[in-house]
Amino acid sequence: MNILINFIRFSRLHTIIGTTLSISALYVLAYALSDHNHWHLETLILTLVSCLGANIYIVGLNQITDVDIDRINKPYLPLASGAFTMRTGYIIIIVSVLISLLTAFYLGHYLLLTVILSLLLGTAYSLPPFRLKRFYFWAAFCIIAVRGLIVNILLFLHFHYTINQSEQIPLVIWLLTATIFVYSLVIAWFKDMPDMEGDSRYEIRTLSIRLGAKKVFLIGNIIISLTYMTLILLPLVYNFQVNGTVILIAHLVFLIGLFIANSRVNLRQQSSIFRYYQFIWILFFLEYFTFALAGILGK
């Protein structure tokens, strides 16, 4: 049981949930926008295996290269706490990346391109000599490129081509991509706010260190709020081939929830900032659920 718990911690559960939900939602949207009734569940399952393997490699490599920083910022992680040896960490990421690449190669070019690009950016994010996480612009770029662009566009094309033999990207996917782009940007900023002590000591120049947590918090919330207001208004103007009422109501609820949650944050307490960061991840999860539901009800 301890091994399983530590493996879940090593895999960074919130990223696993985010990857699973994004893949499942894109699959549902591809199916909802088709005229076919064949589900292609084998494709969905193998795609999940491949992408989760890449996910575990990326977050695992980050822990291997950041073990000293994590002893300050995240001492509960298995490498930082000593629950896993470095050798165990290397074994996990090597097996994960091999499973990811072999499965992607079997399924086709769109998934393979998704995995390769994600792995390259994830490696450059953590590994010297690049170690892009040291620079707030490039750190944000890696997260935005993978979660905001590569996953949504290429994985949708992967499913859309498999189910519908089509390579056209509907308007709703561009809307989802733009929305997740914003989340990825804000998550890239907010994830560093609880870790300022360790990052500062090891000269990781995050935006929170350069501007201060208060300014980053304010800018991030303004951007998300404007995104929600846009998503409330757009279904009244455009037909996205999904149920616009679901998108409108959901984002009205998200906007109210965001105002309530950020009014309770104490930027002087690391635990309060971290809880709010987790809340943003929950909104991120709900975004994919909302678009998938809109697709199902709009079919």
Image (cartoon, helix red, strand yellow):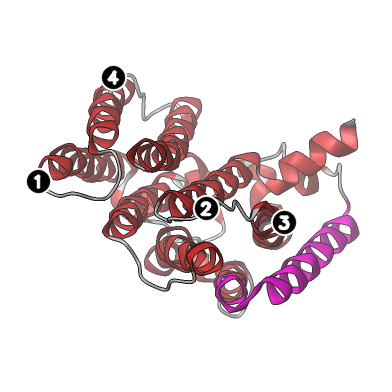
Q: Which residue is mark 3?
A: 49
**Residue 156 x %, y %:** 47, 62
Three-letter code, disc 2: Tyr
Dot placed on the residue nearer the N-terminal end, 4 or 3: 3
Look at the image and tell me whether residue 135 can be seen: no
The residues tagged by marks 3 and 1 sit, at their Cα atoms, a distance apart of 38 Å
Spatial CA span between label 1 and label 2: 26 Å
Label 3 or label 1, whichever comes before in sequence order:
3
Q: What amino acid type should be assigned to the residue bearing mark 1?
A: Val
Task: Nearest to the eye among marks 4 and 3: give it.
Answer: 3
Q: Nearer the viewer, mark 2 or mark 4?
A: 2
Residue at which label 1 appears:
237
Circle 2 sits on which residue?
A: 27
Residue 257 or residue 135, whichever sits in front: 257
Q: Position of residue 107 (x, y in %)?
A: 68, 71
In this rendering, the label closer to the viewer, 4 or 1: 1
Evaluate if marks 4 and 3 touch, with contact meaning CB atoms under 8 Å apart. Answer: no
Q: Residue at x 42, y 30 (%)?
A: 276
Q: Which residue is mark 4?
A: 260
Q: Position of residue 253 (x, y in %)?
A: 28, 24
Q: Are marks 3 and 1 in contact (CB under 8 Å)?
A: no
**Residue at figure coordinates x 22%, y 33% from the top left:** 248
Q: Residues within 10 Å of mark 3 (few under 14, many from 20)?
A: some
Q: Which residues are magenta?
A: 85-114
Does the residue at mark 4 contact the one at mark 1 (Cβ under 8 Å)? Answer: no
**Residue 106 on the magenta span:** yes
Dot 3: element: helix
- Badge 4 amino acid: Ile
Pick the quarter of the image with the N terminus: top right
